[in-house]
Image (spheres, rainbow, N blue to C red):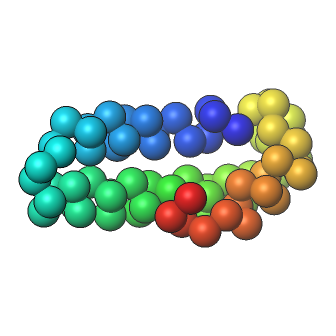
Amino acid sequence: MERTLSSDSLFQDSSSTVRGNLPLQIIATLLLWKRRIISRHQLARLDERLLADAGISLYERQAEISKPFWR
């Protein structure tokens, strides 16, 4: 599942460099949430063949897309 959420680490790394700057932290968090929403929508649209190619089971997909955007 890490393959589908690898972009999260980019946002988390950038948010850690802006400690002490609340407006930038808020923007970084909002961008992270937006990316999660988009990634999970894309994941939900994949058929079984594409999921198998990515090494993701139907159970893993369901578990990921059922998470709230803030997790």
**Residue name at image x 56 percent, y 59 percent:** 71
Q: Quadrant of residue 32?
A: bottom left
* Looking at the image, residue 16 lies above or below residue 60: above
Q: Is residue 54 left or right of residue 42?
A: right
Q: Quadrant of residue 49?
A: top right
Residue 70 visible within the image: yes
Residue 37 visible within the image: no
Q: Is residue 67 left or right of residue 7?
A: right
* Looking at the image, residue 44 lies above or below residue 50: below
Residue 28, given in percent of the width and then of the height, sits at 26, 54
* Looking at the image, residue 6 lies above or below residue 22: above
Foreground residue among 62 and 44: 62
Foreground residue among 52 and 4: 4
Foreground residue among 15 and 49: 15
Number of marks in picture: 0
Q: Quadrant of residue 29?
A: bottom left
Foreground residue among 61 and 18: 18
**Residue name at image x 32 percent, y 34 percent:** 13
Residue 63, given in percent of the width and then of the height, sits at 79, 56
Quadrant in which the N terminus is drawn:
top right
**Residue name at image x 89 percent, y 50 percent:** 58
Residue 46, given in percent of the width and then of the height, sits at 74, 52
**Residue name at image x 26 percent, y 44 percent:** 15
